[in-house]
Image (cartoon, helix red, strand yellow):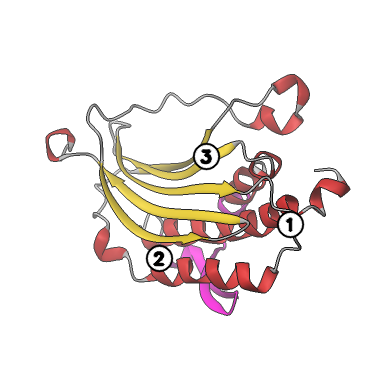
Amino acid sequence: MERSEAQSPQGETARILVEFLEVAVTSIVFLKEVYPAGAFERRRYMNVVVQRARHPELREYIHSAVNGLLPFIQKGQVERVAVIFFNADNIPVERYIFKLMINQSYGSKVEEGELEFSLRSFLTKLSVSQSLSKVLPNGCRWEITAYFRSLPQVDTSKDAEFWIPTNTQQWQQPPLITPIKSMNSDPLNVQLYLEHPIFSERKS
């Protein structure tokens, strides 16, 4: 982002949100036990104990994917960010969805402490949400996917080059949705929920 954009309420909000998403995605991957517990180490973030990936490639993937969305989140182009887990047949079995909305007309100074306090509650809720999720089958993989309200132009943004259209299979029926946490405030609204396929689409 340009310096003036970064200093705008939307730029400041996007910066805080992207930093939070990086920690939240790592927490989800840890929670799902995709990797051994030793692949993570405890850290404090927003005065909450969280997990940080120890493996450089894992840490870099999460960091690059989420931070690559920064200019698009700031402009309100990103509707949802999802952490999707797939079975061995490459079919989604579970999705953690962050639904985002930054108020583009908000013009006041961002109260960083208040915003971080609200986002911290998501991390607390995530840490006790394991009972809401499903045990993953063997051979699972995962990825971070962003859903844009409008596709960015590759020729006008170098950041867009890092995001390609997904070929992820979609469920045939509307998913089962389990709310985890939401916040509604200016300048930021966030909803976190789980999506599962209906019973007839699940594969053992």
Answer with mark 2 or mark 1, whichever residue precedes in sequence.
Answer: 1
| Residue at the extreme bottom of the image, as rendered | 47
* Residue for point 41% across, 43% down: 142
| Residue 44 image position (x, y, % from top left) | 58, 76
Q: Say the numbered circle drawn on residue 73.
A: none
Q: Amino acid at mark 3?
A: Glu
Q: Amino acid at mark 1?
A: Glu
Disc 2, SS = helix
Answer with mark 2 or mark 3, whichever residue precedes in sequence.
Answer: 3
* Residue for point 33% across, 51% down: 194
Q: Say the numbered circle drawn on residue 12.
A: 1
Instruction: For the residues labelled 2 and 1, say whether their Cβ atoms are less than 8 Å apart.
Output: no
Residue at numbered disc 3: 79
Quadrant in the rendering for residue 95: top left
Work out how far the residue at label 2 is from the one at label 3, CA to CA, in angstroms: 20 Å
Instruction: For the residues labelled 1 and 3, say whether their Cβ atoms are less than 8 Å apart.
Output: no
Answer with mark 1 or mark 3, whichever residue precedes in sequence.
Answer: 1
Q: Is residue 3 visible?
A: yes
Q: Is residue 55 visible?
A: no
Q: Dot 2 surroundings within 10 Å: few (below 14), some, or many (20 or more)?
A: some
In front of the other: 135 or 124: 124
Identify the magenta region: 36-60
Q: Dot 3 surroundings within 10 Å: few (below 14), some, or many (20 or more)?
A: some
Quadrant in the rendering for residue 37: bottom left
Would residue 44 be counted in the magenta stretch?
yes
Disc 1, SS = helix
State which quarter of the image contains the C terminus: top left
